[in-house]
Image (cartoon, rainbow, N blue to C red):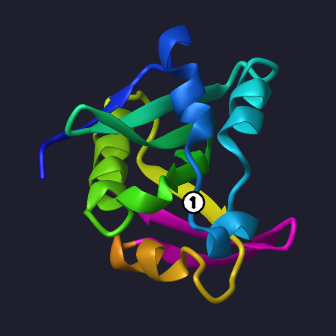
């Protein structure tokens, strides 16, 4: 597998990024990328990137950069259905962690997810995220500390 990069979304790649879709069984776990990008233009603290591997756009990630308890929040994350299972998701999270480790005052990443069959809980736990015991809008929160 080639290196995964997090790349700013340009106008030229917008249609490709918004056309990405998770598998049909996962649609209830993540919002469409078009909605995420639209939200980002109204929330200055949102930082988003295309996930690129082997010269192709394979996913999307968006962070909420407001630091709370030394953490930023993984707001949206998805890997295109056909690209899943290739290691791109774990590699992209490692790239997110590399990025945010350079941000002053940040020593962790939080996220929340909907529990359910086919959901992201196993993926998150395999990456080292631990449940915080909190729920946010009916979603289970987890965090990964790196300092």
Residue most toward the left? 2
Instruction: Indicate the quadrant where residue 90 lies.
Output: bottom left
Observer able to see residue 123? yes
Q: Is residue 17 left or right of residue 112?
A: left
44, above or below 4, in the image: above
Percent x, y of residue 4? 24, 41
Q: Residue at x 30, y 55 (%)?
A: 88
Instruction: Indicate the quadrant where residue 47 lies.
Output: top right
Reply yes or no: does residue 47 show up in magenta: no
Q: Residue at x 59, y 25 (%)?
A: 15
Instruction: Indicate the quadrant where residue 117 lies.
Output: bottom right
* Part of the protein shown in magenta: 129-147
Give the main secondary structure of the magenta stretch: strand
Percent x, y of residue 93? 36, 52
93, above or below 141, in the image: above
Nearer to us in this view, 90 or 118: 118
Observer able to see residue 63? no
Percent x, y of residue 76? 62, 48
Residue most toward the bottom? 117
- Disc 1 packing (10 Å; few <14; some 14–19; many ≥20): many
Nearer to us in this view, 12 or 8: 12
Per the image, the residue denoted by label 1 is 22
């Amino acid at each position: 597998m080639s290196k995964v990069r997090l790349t700013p979304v340009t106008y030229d790649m917008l249609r490709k990024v918004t056309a990405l879709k998770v598998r049909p069984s996962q649609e209830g776990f993540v919002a469409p990328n078009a909605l995420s990008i639209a939200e980002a233009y109204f929330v200055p603290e949102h930082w988003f990137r295309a996930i690129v591997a082997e010269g192709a756009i394979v996913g999307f990630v968006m962070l909420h950069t407001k630091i709370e308890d030394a953490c930023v929040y993984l707001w949206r994350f998805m890997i295109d259905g056909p690209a899943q299972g290739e290691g791109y998701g774990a590699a992209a999270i490692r790239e997110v962690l590399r990025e945010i480790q350079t941000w002053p005052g940040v020593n962790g990443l939080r996220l929340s997810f909907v529990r359910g069959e086919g959901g992201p809980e196993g993926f998150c736990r395999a990456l080292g995220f631990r449940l915080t015991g909190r729920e946010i809008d009916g979603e289970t929160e987890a965090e990964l500390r790196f300092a």
